[in-house]
Amino acid sequence: MRKMLLALLLCLSACAPQSGGKPLRFQTGYLDLFDTVTAITGYAKSQTEFDRFAETIRGRLEELHRLYDIYHEYNGINNLCTVNKNAGIAPVAVDKDIIGLLLLAREWHGLSGGAVNVALGPVLQIWHEYRTEGKELPPMEDLRKAADLTDINDLVIDEAAGTVFLRKAGMSLDVGSVAKAYAAGLAIQAAEEIGMRSALLDTGGNIVSLGRPPDNTRGHWSIGIQDPDRVAGGERDFVDTVYIAGLSVSSSGGYHRYYVVDGQAYHHIIDPDTMMPATRYKQVAVIHETPALADLLSTALFILPYEEGAALAGQCGAEALWIDIDGSRKATDGFAKYRQW
Ligand code: AMP
Ligand code: MG
């Protein structure tokens, strides 16, 4: 069984629409992008102006969704599915938004000590198939064989030629750990370029904030960090709330996508050391000014032992909250400052 829950983080900013020339608050959302829930909250002078902002965000996200799709190809473009199909065959000419994403992801493979690897496709594909089928665990022998085709050094990015090549047949990219927030960052940038000043964009638990909400005294967006044990309609919807402006918050959690075998849940974030779902935490939330880094870090910290994760967060200027399997919580020292209204 494959299960996707609604967005992990929700905007809690409680602001009623106003009149008298002040910006009004609007919201819209989609279910058809990046296989997740997308929500836009934004301020504008009118519905017409907000619609223009939202259409720009939607348009950019659609474009990036097509480029980063590993399951389908689209007429007239080469996307990551095209790159994967050409593994071991030929370099593929791709858009600069693919080159940018892959350069960043490759750099992060090293920074995360190999925990986050966008070339882990063959292993993730096996888990994806078994999760979709929902019956049993993948044989370790199959996972081991697939792991032989996950060396990030066999991802060749030629910036000058604008091409990407996977050296060995059978290799494949999976950018699920970073693509949503990377895309959200670019989409918010596009909206800012046409005049949007104040917005929150949530792509499945990756929240990017632009500016400040103009009708709230402190000018902070309130972001609820969803309880990983939440029962729909239950009382403890949020385990924490952070107040941010111009920053991003990303969460990685086992409960986003999982299936159950013999009474045990197996989720979608795979530790490359064991090739099994990472078992240290229920959820990790990361605050960083760069959307894609918040996303990459939340996946990395979900996999890494606490000491290594905390060191990495410190090195990157990120703040983080870890929720252990037993429900206990740890946070970086600086996380507390975002709890203050
Ligand atoms: P996130 O929700 O941002 O933590 O990303 C989870 C997604 O990243 C999964 O659904 C996979 O597509 C992909 N993924 C899982 N494990 C890894 C890993 N170790 N390295 C890179 N990508 C991964
Ligand atoms: Mg991530």
Image (cartoon, helix red, strand yellow):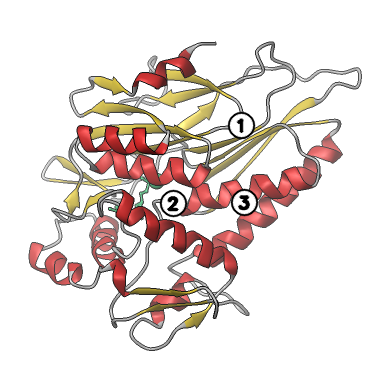
Decide if residue 237 is in sight here. no
Q: Name the residue: 57% across, 63% down.
A: 97
| Secondary structure at numbered mark 2 | loop
Q: Nearer the viewer, residue 182 or 112?
A: 112
| Secondary structure at numbered mark 1 | loop
Q: Name the residue: 34% across, 71% down.
A: 172
Circle number at residue 178:
2
**Quarter of image, res 254:** top left
Circle number at residue 246:
1
Query: Mark 3: which amino acid?
Result: Leu
From the viewer's perspective, tell me whether residue 302 is left or right of residue 219: left
Q: Earlier in the sequence, mark 2 or mark 3?
A: 2
Query: Mark 1: which amino acid?
Result: Gly
- In the picture, the quarter occupied by the C terminus is top right
Residue 157 picture location, percent across and down: 44, 73
Residue 224 picture location, percent across and down: 48, 23
Q: Name the residue: 19% across, 70% down.
A: 146
Mark 2 vs ligand 2: CB under 8 Å? Answer: yes
Q: Earlier in the sequence, mark 3 or mark 1?
A: 3
From the viewer's perspective, tell me whether residue 282 is left or right of residue 338: left
| Secondary structure at numbered mark 3 | helix
- 234 is higher (above) or lower (below) than 310: above
Q: Which residue is mark 3?
A: 186
